[in-house]
Image: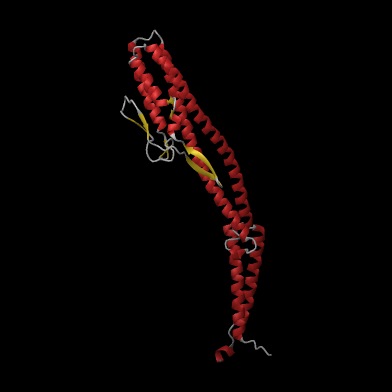
Amino acid sequence: MNVRVTGQTQTNSAVAYLRQNAAGLAKYQDQVSSGLRVKLPSDDPAQYPALARARAAGERLGAYAGTLAAATTDLNAGVGALQEATSVLTRAKQIAVEGADAGTDQQGATALATEVDGLIARMLSAANTEQDGAYLFGGTATGSPPFAADAAGNPTTITYNGTADRGRGLIGPGQTVDTKYAGAAVFQRPGADVFQTLIGLRDDLRNPGAGGKSQAINARLGAIDAALDAVGDTTAEQASHLAGLDALQGRMTDLKLTADTRAGEIEGTDYFDAVVRMRAQENALQATMAVSAKLLQPSLLDFIR
């Protein structure tokens, strides 16, 4: 079979070579300028699945790092609130000792009671601590203050309006941490009700009753110690969670770095190789253009035809 090579065939071949070389040059120019060797599956079909897995792992670990950071922020705020509660109770204990002293007259006791009213307000504020618009001691009910007083300035009861369940944050595959605590279990434990202890101390200072001021206030010291223990237990638990989150954050950072590094190794440009190939494509394109210019020059016969 004879194949006739016509001028049109030569033209088509020349144009095809030009396009092929130009596309190759553009490919390596893009690799050099963008720093990416693999953008599409067709760029490296053999390695693209590994790249997709590394990218997915990096994104997943990045998401967990975000929830870890949020959990850490919540727990730090919670520990801060509990430390404030401890400070309030420590001062209440000092007041109780001072108020029970026989040398403290009723005028002095009344002044101390007024200070306890301020401590109650501080404790209520600590128990209603919020972080980024979410209350930390309402359990899973985070949208409104968990504790409410029946009266401003001189409350007689404090009501808990949260839930009994703790709120949790996802910090890893199937792994959670308690971040929103049920306030009733912290501030209103049976026998260690922080608010009723403070309210009782205030009322004892103002109205000592038949048994006398010292007897009534001394009885409150045990309740204050119990309240301190309750708050201290929760503080220790949250501090322990924070230590665990810190270690997990470091591990998560290492894993994400490994995944991102692997993705970068696969998709990143090998600049030396890319530049060498780019120069080769430039030379091939120039050679093709030179040959094509000669092949495609119009002759007198072209005009006659």
Q: Please provide percent x and percent y for residue 126.
A: 41, 30
Extreme-bottom residue of the structure:
304
Q: Residue at x 50, y 31 (%)?
A: 234
Q: Is 205 placed above or below 194 here? A: above
Q: Is residue 24 left or right of residue 189?
A: right
Query: Quarter-wise, where is residue 90 in the image?
Result: top left
Q: Quadrant of the C terminus?
A: bottom right
Report the residue at 45% width, 32% height from top.
185
Q: Is residue 296 visible?
A: no
Q: What percent of the width, then of the height, locates residue 217?
A: 40, 15
Nearest to the observer: residue 91 or residue 266: 91
In front of the other: 164 or 231: 164
- Residue farthest left in this picture: 151
Looking at the picture, how far across and down is residue 235, in whole percent? 50, 30
Residue at 59% x, 90% y: name it. Answer: 301
Colour basis: secondary structure
Q: Residue at x 55, y 33 (%)?
A: 240
Give how far across and how far down residue 173 sits, in percent: 56, 47
Q: Is residue 224 above or below residue 268?
A: above
Residue positioned most to the top: 103
Query: Residue farthest to the right?
Result: 1
